[in-house]
Amino acid sequence: MENWKLRQATWKDKELLYEWRNDFASRSASFHQQEISMTEHESWLERKLSDSVSSIYILEINNEPVGQARLDRNSGVAHISYSIGGRFRGQGYGKLLLQLLEDEAAKESLVLVGQVKKDNVASQVIFQSLGYEERETEEFFEYRKTARNVLLKQTDVLRGGNPPHQ
Ligand SMILES: CC(C)(COP(=O)(O)OP(=O)(O)OC[C@H]1O[C@@H](n2cnc3c(N)ncnc32)[C@H](O)[C@@H]1OP(=O)(O)O)[C@@H](O)C(=O)NCCC(=O)NCCS
């Protein structure tokens, strides 16, 4: 049976986050597509980990890291970036990650915003299935939602548990 946990990223996740950042599908889905060097990544990660407006989380399934999500806050609004590692895609973990992220954001009553490229159907399906309001622009779909406690309490997040059937 699968056991999941959402935890804060640390400096020890540097290599993993670097690998996921430079992954082809992740770069294609991103609005900043160029490959980055480890040196650039290190200074970026150092900045993000010490910046109180940003939080990076790692989703673990059976103690194995499978994906990451980041919140960048600005005046009560938090922009979401997220990805699932290549070999873990197609198993519903993207949705689980956003559900757990929303629970975290609900503690601060954040308004969550995700911008998704028009060819990224999997991510559109995930935001839609979680009840985000959709707005179409010329270049992307924007999803917006006030974070609610949809899934778990903090104690459950720390303890881990089984993915919900939602
Ligand atoms: C986008 C991403 C996070 C999705 O995570 P995932 O766990 O692999 O998602 P899944 O493959 O389980 O797909 C999610 C849903 O989209 C559906 N879907 C996927 N591709 C689809 C397609 N081409 N057409 C229609 N539906 C599709 C799946 O069936 C699933 O729906 P379901 O839950 O109703 O079965 C992952 O592919 C990823 O990391 N991509 C690269 C980075 C990225 O795109 N990040 C998001 C930026 S906004």
Image (cartoon, helix red, strand yellow):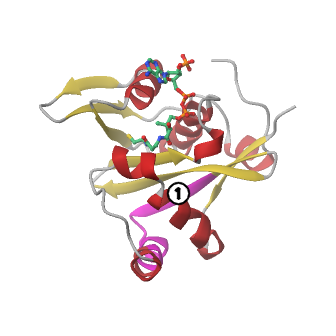
Task: Give residue 105's position: percent from left, percent from top.
Answer: 48, 45
Residue at x-position 65% and y-position 40%: 88
Quadrant the C terminus occupies: top right
Query: On the rendered structure, is 41 left or right of 163?
Result: left
Magenta extent: 45-58
From what the image shows, is residue 146 above or below residue 42?
above
Along the line of sight, which residue is nearer the eye, 71 or 16?
Answer: 16
Kind of residue indicated by mark 1: Trp
Q: Is residue 108 visible?
A: no
Along the line of sight, which residue is nearer the eye, 100 or 149?
Answer: 100
Residue at x-position 39% and y-position 44%: 110
How crowded is the residue under tag 1: few (<14 C-alpha within 10 Å), some, or many (20+)? many
Determine whether the beta carbon of the residue marked 1 sits less than 8 angstroms from the nearest atom of ligand 1: no
| Residue under numbered circle 1 | 20
Residue 156 covered by magenta stretch = no
Task: Give residue 7's position: percent from left, percent from top.
Answer: 66, 56
